[in-house]
Amino acid sequence: MLEAIRSKVERGERLSFDDGVVLFRHPDVVEVGQLANLVRERLHGDRTYFNRNMRIETTNVCVASCLFCSFAKLEEGAPGARTMRVEEAWRELEARLDDPPSEIHVVNGLHPGLPFSYYEELLTGFKRIKPDVHLKCFTAVEIHFFAAHYGMTHREVLERLRRAGLDSLPGGGAEIFDPEVRTRISHDKATADEYLEVHRVAHGLGMPTNATMLYGHIETFEHRVDHLLRLRALQDETRGLQAFIPLAFHPDGNGMRSLPAPTAVDSLRTVAVSRLLLDNVPHLKAYWVSMTPEVAQIALRFGADDVDGTIVHETIYRAAGSRAPGALTAAQLVRLIQEAGRLPVERDTLYHVVREHPRAALPEAALKVRERKAAKHLEVLP
Amino acid sequence: MTDSRLRVAAVGYLNARPLYEGLDRDPASARLRLDCAVPSEVARRVAEDEADVALMPVAAAATIGDLRLVRGCAIASRGPVRSVVLVGDAPIDELDEIGVDLSSRTSVVLARLVLRARRRGGEPRLVGRAPREALEHVRGRTGALVIGDPALEVEGRHAHVVDLAQAWRELTGLPFVFAAWCGRPGALSGDDERLLERARALGLERRPAIAAEYAARTGLSASSLLSYLREAIAYELGDEERRGLERFYDEAARAGLLPPARVRFFDEDRKAPSPAPSLDGLLARAAEGKRLSAAEGERLGQEASLFDLGLAADAVRCRRHPDGVVTYIVDRNVNYTNVCTTSCRFCAFYRPLGHPEAWLLTREELGKKLQEVVDAGGVQILLQGGLHPELRIEWYEDLFRWMKREYGLGLHALSPEEILHVARLEGLSVHAVLERLRAAGLDSVPGGGAEILVDRVRRTIAKAKCTSDEWLGVMRVAHHMGLRSSATMMYGTVDTLRDRVNHLVKVRDLQDETRGFTAFFCWDFQHERGTRIEPGDNGTVLYLRQQALARILLDNIEHVGASWVTQGPEVGQVALRFGADDFGSVMFEENVVSSAGTTFGMNAGAMESRIRAAGFRAARRNVHYEWLTPPA
């Protein structure tokens, strides 16, 4: 069953919708992982990326009522609702200047009561404190909300934020594109087309973005494949997606709390199939906050080439019951990658190499893996 | 100053002495250090890199794998050897049962090949017995394989005798090689080899003196011993002997009794490098469930990809358990005390006696835990503690009886270390302790405390713990009594891949003898607050590799379990696709690992759904891995 797909992968041919479904349904996840690893090593060899980044969520007030979310509080003043003043957010960066992040990653709720200048000031302030910090802020869903709320086009929002310091967009808010699923789990925020359009506009402005998929709730394998192929089509058009990040649904404290969380086997399979279908997106992240650092290590052999970053302060997955630690140091990430037998490479947000680490600092190199060199290269936004 | 002399180990038996006794007359021998030991110990030293070269039985050399031999020197036989014989009161080919010393692997394999050939594939039942005990059992249709001095002592006493070297000669027309000088590639220089050759020449001249000395010590006839050394044993390893050994390796591998082995001399490596066999061929043999040598296991551990290992292990799992069922057990790990005298550096759980945080569970506390297990539909208690210096055997007996009487749960209790501790404390044999505990309710023995069954590692991480041989010895006794046990491995401290593979091979060797292990579990050292050793080889990818390698190498152990308690439910689930067919136990509590910081919880429902999400059906089991619920 997998043979036809295997030969396509070996020849570097594009996989179809049906191939994607077959891969999701194939009983042996290890075989699927092996195929994905082939592609991963073709693209990146043993190189495995991470960065020093810092998550800041400045408000959890949100007008959307997504079923899967344990983070957002609907109204200002509701129990647990919290909005930072910009000075508080800046202080978080100032507090870390002795070991500064190269990237700040802001994801917020859709707050109806803040002026647009709040976001501009937020970014300007970060750049004032650390001019070379990369600001990867606000998901396409937030950008779309800003456009509607403040009466601007997507392009106007992005241009104003870019002037304030925005460098790229994170990939959150994609959830599942299929309209039926999306209506059920997050009916009152950007549609799939709107999400994709924001990315398209950003790419048109020369601004790279990431993309995500929230899997493991009420969607089917067909919905996942559909989601991935819509991203692949966008990427064919724009070449602006740097990385794809599959996000595992976590059920604690949200509107789908009766559903089980996806298991590690599903997570690894999703990483693998994503790698195989998204043949035009250079990087695939094993987001350790979502899948735990332990499973992320395995994912580095199931198609992923990036573990995201040090994170420092994540509250969205925490609220949904993630057992992963809140932060990992750069040294811990290096070790995590080394233990998986890979070559750790510290990068900046745009995948420029900051520092290459040695292959394994283990007392006894447990894995005498042969050096694997990348044989293929995917460009993002020349 | 480190001793840089060549480390030479040799079997100390009479028939080996002519090969090395000449060394003391050779001034060049100052550059080597010779130690004599029993065959298993000699082989162990080469396997664990404590000896550079050893005069060892050929089956042990095949098990280690990829060794080189010294050309010209061997303990061989071209006809009757007299000291390796099958004896019986009935014709040997009509025996139903043969008592054998299963640790004498070369002779046992030879006996089995000869018996199978003579009976066209059929084989009598082989029963492990100590040599003298085996002889006492000879009557009717029960015979014995007799080796060494006992064989010489009983010459002429039994109506029916098959000399195995003679039988081999009749079968193949070739000599039989029992032992040879073996070492890892490159271990010997040409000078070293010439030294051993000269020693052999000198030793052969000294045969009369060796025989006379031995006769004086044992009371055997000196002339008979001399003729044994002169005629029965051929101290040659020429072309004929080489063909005999190759034939033996070939037939033993074909019968699945030994890993496939080649005969290659040290001097051949010096002429041309030895080509490495293909990794794919090795993986294919692994996937077929064929027996691999330690060297082959090490090669897989070093060079095979995670997927190759996983798919091969999964193929093995699939052949053994074609129903696609993964089992789990509802039991409870109860630690009766945290008092322990061993101070292992990897352990954050123990406290010395009298420490403010030391505790010993009361009956009341225990009862509460046991009742919870009964209420949850549990079937067993895994009871382990520390080496408490004040608990006598009566304490355990009373406890076991009370637990059995009040709660009726299976009792999987006391790791070998604790059993040894009680035996020492009471001045009783392990056998006597186990008999008394079994009478009080012990059902099976958990395989904890194995850590790494390589003493160099054990001395570093757990100085006060029993040796590898002691651990295995307790299991041997338990298995011979009919008690089943699990086997474990905790790696990731100072151990190397070679240590881990040697651990697996030791477990496999004992399993060949006893068939008493039900299952194997491994996990890595849980480095946390309270432990006093740095982590070594760790990580979840290594866990999956290690578990897969265990499934591949442990070709005689039925079950391999995923240790989700240490790896987490997520990685535990993934491990089911890397050779495991068991998901361990639901978690009520566990103190040792969790005091090192690892805490996960999973109930039966969560275990079953993870098993199913990995593509298997789930069934509850008991300690014997019998299904208690239909797979679903």
Image (tube, coloured by chain):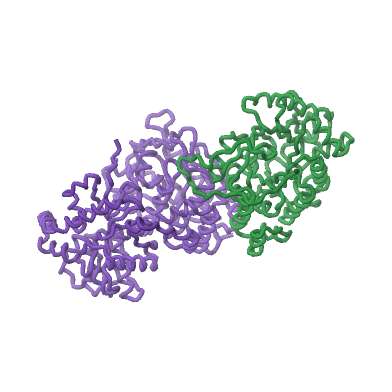
Residue at image coords 48%, 62% = B281
Compared to residue B79, the image places residue A301 above or below, namely above
Q: From the top left corner, tell me how far across and down residue B621 is, in percent.
A: 50, 56
The quadrant in which the C terminus of chain B is found is bottom right
Q: From the top left corner, tell me how far across and down residue A173 is, in percent.
A: 76, 42
* Residue B516 seen in the current view: no
Which one is in front, B386 or B163? B163
Instruction: Tell me: B453 left or right of B107.
Output: right
Q: Residue furthest front?
A: B271
Instruction: Tell me: A328 left or right of B133.
Output: right
Compared to residue B290, the image places residue A232 above or below, namely above
Q: From the top left corner, tell me how far across and down residue A135 is, in percent.
A: 73, 33
Residue at image coords 73%, 39% = A170
* Residue A355 seen in the current view: yes
The quadrant in which the N terminus of chain B is found is top left
Q: Residue furthest right?
A: A151
| Chain A as rendered: colour | green
Q: Number of numbered discs present?
A: 0
Q: Dividing the picture into quarters, in which one does residue B277 lie?
A: bottom left
Residue at image coords 21%, 73% = B160
Q: From the top left corner, tell me how far across and down residue B142 is, in percent.
A: 26, 69
| Chain B as rendered: colour | purple
Which one is in front, A49 or B4? B4
